[in-house]
Amino acid sequence: MRKLEDRKRPRFTLGLGGLLIGGSVGFVALVTVILVVFALLSAREAAVEPLRQGTRLVVDALAERTRDHLQAAKAQGDYISRLVARELAGRAGASEITGTLVASLAAAPQVSTVVYLRPDLTGIQVAREADRPAEVAILDLSGNEEARQAVDEALQIGAGSWGAPFAADTDPRLAYLNYRVPVRGKGDDLGLVVVMLRSDRLSRFMRDLALPPIRSAFILYDGNRVLAHPSFDGPAPVNLPRLAEMDDPALQALVAGSGLGSFAATQPGGSDGPDGSDEAPLIIREVGGRPLLYLFRDLRGFAPEPLWVGAYVNLDDVGVGPERFQTIALVGLSIVAAAAAIAALLARRLAATIRDLAGQANAVARFELEQVDTPERSRVRELDDLAQAFTAMLRVTGAFATYVPRQLVRRLLEAGHDSEPLSEQRELTVMFTDLTGFSSMAEHRPAGETARLLNEHFARLTACVVAEGGTVDKFLGDAVMAFWGAPERQADHAARALRAAAAMQEAYRDDPMRTRFGLGLRIGLHTGQVLVGDIGTPERLNYTIVGDAVNVAARLVELCREHGPAGGVVVLATGTTVHAAQAEAAMEDLGDHAVRGRFQGERVYRLCPGRLSQSARIAGTSLASS
């Protein structure tokens, strides 16, 4: 959590009631005068401003939904690139990569095609038609110079980038938006992932989103080519037709005079309005005797040239002709500007502190204390008192959070944990870790250095536990106790625990406990029934686990000294854990061993470094999905 600092109290403060009364009276008086003057000028023209504002809201919503639509495809492309890189690192074959592409395509309805190209331009394509299963094709573009240039360009960029819309091989009238992401592993280029969106689906998307008073919504590429239009139920008449080639007179009218075509040609890159905003100028055209008002929003970063989401309305819908529109727009703008100026003065004084406190309170509610900062002081007396009280509360919460695992509290909050102490029997996987030779090392080191080294060690192990969704129960001297399967249920808790142990093997390589002092790390894993929940008294509770399974995991740590070098990492797991995780291929069977405190022996396995196979990881994933 950030350091909480005291802020100076303002020299003077105002009462909230006085500020609201004075501000409201002044605001109402000013707006009333403006409305009376405006009514004397023209009452009938007053309907245009609401129409324009309503149209702008709809166009804003269209642009935002389209942006989200494209951003979702971009995020899916980045995600697929990471998946493919991870699979290639695990030496996955073409069938595994194909399965990944098919599953990723199913999770992204806005994407129609996913392609993975290797550096030699061979690869796999997965395409999906509406209401049809995905079709898989093997690609070989090694002889396609245009494809080679496109891949080299994308790899040279080094990050995800949007390419220019291109025509489909199967239907040259159909255009595809495409997002390319390099696949990298250990600093090398492993190929390219391309996700593609069909233009006809964007057309249906625009048609479904257009709401009154919008007559038609569309998307333009580079200001003069139509990428999506409601009339494109299937492929367009031609790939990316120009405005002049459209059957829609409203779009043809933009080419004449100073329409969007000439506007885009005069802008640097065609991406900004004349005032530097993201909005094209307000355009009015007379089309077939109808006055049409056009509004546009720029979508940056989804193609080499700008994309424009546009829409138009008929001004005759409110009975106002274009000859009076400029007067109406100016008067409406005056009202909006005056209202915005006065509202901003009040909102900045009243809403800033409240909004800040609400955001801080939400962060505290989620127990994300690292996002919390000292709230700003306010000149409004009551808000200033509230800010000070909130600051005091943050100090108390910060002190509390030092001694309570934040991850556990967040999970209990997400699970809706009741205030009543609750406990239940549940099958979990328990982990114990221990450092060999720590006590001897600590005797010869300063206390401060020992604590620092131990904290760094705990941080490494805890990160591995958290990465696999585990819960750190407690720290016992130089040992860590953790478990999986609670508070939230995890069907693959055994697989998660084994993956965490494998990650600890890797993380411990650079741990000063090993590199400087030669200490070994011993890890024990066991799966069984335990009592989990709030244990203690009403005055002092711990969320922990108790039971025989906990003891078995602790006893396995003692067995580690018999099955590995003193300065290495030894991971032992019982047969219950190994079978539940379906990870026999990664384990060495050590046979039955007597466990202190139990009459029957336990089948014990040792985790072989680097042999936690892809099959074991997939088994854990399938358990989670079930």
Image (cartoon, rainbow, N blue to C red):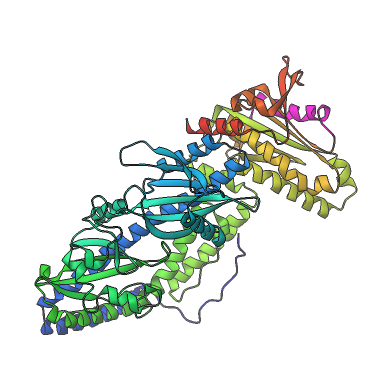
Q: In percent of the image, x 30 and y 38: which residue is there?
A: 131
The answer to whether 110 is drawn above or below residue 381 in the figure is: above
**21 or 91: nearer the viewer:** 91
**281 or 220: nearer the viewer:** 220
- Judged left or right of residue 466, residue 357 is left
Residue 55 visible in the displayed image: no
The answer to whether 447 is drawn above or below residue 468 in the figure is: below
- The magenta stretch spans residue 562: yes
Residue 296 falls in image quadrant:
bottom left
Residue 494: x and y, percent? 61, 30
Residue 9: x and y, percent? 53, 76
**173 or 502: nearer the viewer:** 173
The answer to whether 96 is drawn above or below residue 320 in the figure is: above
Q: In percent of the image, x 82 and y 54: which residue is there?
A: 449
User: Magenta residues, as a range?
Assistant: 546-565
Residue 292: x and y, percent? 16, 71
**526 or 612: nearer the viewer:** 612
Q: In percent of the image, x 19 and y 84: which residue is there?
A: 33
The overriding secondary structure of the stretch rendered in magenta is: helix
Residue 514: x and y, percent? 82, 44
